[in-house]
Image: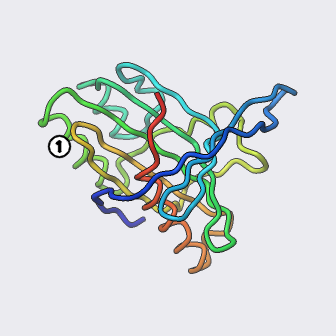
Amino acid sequence: MAAGTLAVVGTVERGPRAPAEGTGGETRRTEVVSVHGLDFERLATDRQRGCDPPHAVGEIEAFLSEYGCEDLRRSSLRTTVDGSPVAVSVAAVSFADDADTTAFRDLAETPGTGTFADPAAEGDRWPGDTPDFADAAFRTALRDHTVMLVLADTPDDASTANGQAAVRAAEAALAVPLEG
């Protein structure tokens, strides 16, 4: 897993919300957001004031249990890069001060320290097979007191082309506007 911090600069275009089939026969509306030449379809979102550590795993869960946070936003997105479908999971964690923000970012950028559960996977809302994000491309970014964590996974991430597609999607997803 490659980790890196990026500054986010780019153009964002929002497309119309289109109807999509949900689970259990309900209909839900999805939004398409265009960033850096990629169209991201938002499948699920979740926002909580304060942190709910059960959505986190590993040392990230322990950090949030001890220090908390101001806001947690999560999104499940999907896109296509050069013909390869890519599943993307975004978590944005906001803190009240520089010290907690920096400590959390340093922890999150350390491989093997944990991540957040994907909201579409929790609600069984992925069309087709649910991605496991086990070998996903990983990127982080800092926006004021918010740490962005992005995982991007392709169905067959063993191929170099698909790995590059996941990295491109992860980097672009850092610029997707957060819901809520």
Q: Image height check: is 122 above or below 39?
A: above
Q: Residue furthest left?
A: 99
Is 52 or 94 nearer to us in this picture? Answer: 94
> Residue 76 placed where, x, y %?
58, 42
Q: Residue furthest top?
A: 49
Please tell me how many numbered marks the rendered image carries.
Answer: 1
Q: In front: 56, or 128?
A: 128
Residue 97 on image: x %, y %:
15, 30
In-image side of 17 versus 71 (left or right):
right
Q: Would residue 40 be found to the left or right of residue 47 on screen?
A: right
Q: Residue furthest right?
A: 25
Q: Residue at x 47, y 54 (%)?
A: 173
Q: Residue at x 35, y 48 (%)?
A: 113
Residue 2 locus on image (x, y percent)? 38, 66
From the image, tell me which residue sits under label 1: 102
> Which residue is painted at 19% across and 26% down in the image?
96
- Disc 1 residue type (three-letter): Thr
Near-viewer residue (18 or 111): 18
In the displayed structure, 6 sits above or below 81; it is above
At 71% from the left and 43% from the top, the residue drawn is: 126
Q: Is residue 77 above or below residue 54?
A: below
Secondary element at tag 1? helix
Left or right of 172 in this view: 30? right
To which quarter of the image does residue 161 belong? bottom right
On-image quarter of the N terminus: bottom left
44 lies above or below 33: above
* Residue 140 locus on image (x, y percent): 34, 53
